[in-house]
Amino acid sequence: MKKKIALIITICVVVIGIVLGIVLTRGTSSEDTPTTVMVTRGDIVKTVLVDGSLEMPNKAYLSFGATGTVTEVLVDKGDSVVEGQVLARLDARSLELSVEVAQAQYETAQINLMKTIYPHYTKAWGADMPGVWLALDEAQDNLKQVQELLNEGKVEEAQVLLDLIEGNISKAEEKSLSRTFQLPWSVKLLELQSDIARANLESAKLNLEKAVITATFDGVVADITITEGKEISTATLATPAISLVDTSDIEMSGFIDELDIAMMELDQEVNILLDALPDEEVKGEVTFISPVGTARAGVVFYDTTITLEGPVAEIRDGMSATAEVIIERRDDVLLIPNRANQGTQENPKVLVLVDEQVEEREITLGLTDGTNAEVLSGLEEGEKVVLHASGEQPSFFFTM
C-alpha cells in the first residue's frame, strides 16, 4: 500500500514538473515580447495605380504620289530627320520636262494676251481708263469748288465736297483695277487659254513634288520598304515607303477602375514605372480622362492618357507601364505603420512603450498610402509603438 502511495506521489510530482516547465517556457517565449516601431518623420503620398502601355502617337507612313523608278534613298533606319528634309526621290526627268513645257505654254499665253487689240490689258485684267478719267475730272472740279467755299469761310460745305472727292478717287482706283465693260471674244479666248496653261503648270509642279518624299516633322526613320531601282507602280502607290515617328512625344494609354475615377483629375502629377526599365522612373501628367466607361469582366474602366515629361532614350513604343497618379501628398509629417493601430477606423488607438511599460493612447490619423499613416496628434517623433499583435495589417485605412 505504501509503495502504491509513493508511486502515485512520484507520478504527480513528474506531471506538476512538466506543467510548470510548459508554463515557464510559454512565459518566456518571444511571442510575449511586443514588437515595436519608432514614430518617424517623412513624406507620405496617396496614389492611384493605372496599368497600360506606352505609345508614340505622332507617326507618319510616307509614300510617293507618282509612279516611276526609285533613284535615291537618302536615309537609313534609325536616322534622325528634320521637317522638310528630302528622304527619297523617283526618276523625275519626264516630270521636270513637263514642268518646263507647261511653264513655256503659260508664258506664251500671257504674251498673246498682252498683244491683243485691247490697249490697256495687263495680266488678265482690263483697266476702265475712261471711267478713271471721268472720276478724276469730277474730283478736280470739286476741288475748285472747295477752294471757293473755303475762301468764303464756308467750312462745313467745303467738308461735304471733300468727302465727295474722296469717294471719286476711290471710284477711280476701283476702275483702274477692274473692267466694267465687255471684252472682245478673241480676248476672252486668250484669257481662257492662259488660265488653262496656268492650271497645267500647277499640275505639272504638283506631280513633280509627288516624286519626292520629304519628312513631315522632326523625327526618326522607323522603317524603309523601298530600295534604289525599285519600280513604283499604281498598285504599290498606297504602300508606305518610309515610316517616321516622333520619339520626343510619348504618351501612356491606360485604364482607371471606376472605384478610383472620382479621385482622378487632369494635370495630376504621375510617376511612371516601366517593366522593361525597372531602374528608370519617368514623370508625367494626366492629360485625358474619358467621360465614357467600358465594362470588362463586370468592372467598369475609363480610358486615360498620361503624357510623359522628358522621356529617356531607352523608351520604346508599346512598352508596358504602370502609372502612380499622385492624388495627395504630405511632406515632413509623423508616420507610423497601419499595423500599429489597435483601435478602429473611427477611434484609432496605439500601445506606446514608455519606461518598459505599455500604455494605451488615443491618436488622430490623417493621410495613408496603404502601408503607413500620417499622425496628426497623440504621438511624438521617436516614441515607440507596438505593432498589431496578429502581425497582420488592419483591413481599414484612414484618409484626411
Image (cartoon, rainbow, N blue to C red):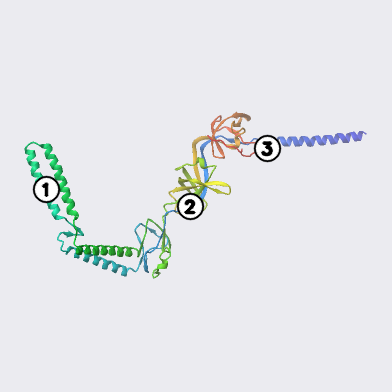
The image shows residue 147, relative to residue 72, as above or below, that is above
> Residue sitting at 84 percent across and 34 percent down?
12
For mark 3, what is the residue? 31
The residue tagged with tag 2: helix, strand or loop? Answer: strand
> Residue type at mark 1?
Glu
Residue 144 placed where, x, y %?
8, 44
> Residue type at mark 3?
Glu
For mark 2, what is the residue? 54
For mark 1, what is the residue? 138
> Residue type at mark 2?
Leu
Q: Which of 296 and 179 is in front in this view?
A: 179
Q: Pointer 3: residues within 10 angstroms few (<14), some, or many (20+)?
A: few
C-alpha gap between disc 2 and disc 1: 74 Å
Ranked by sequence position, the earlier of labels 3 and 2 is: 3
Q: Which of 327 and 133 is in front in this view?
A: 133
Q: Which mark is residue 295?
A: none
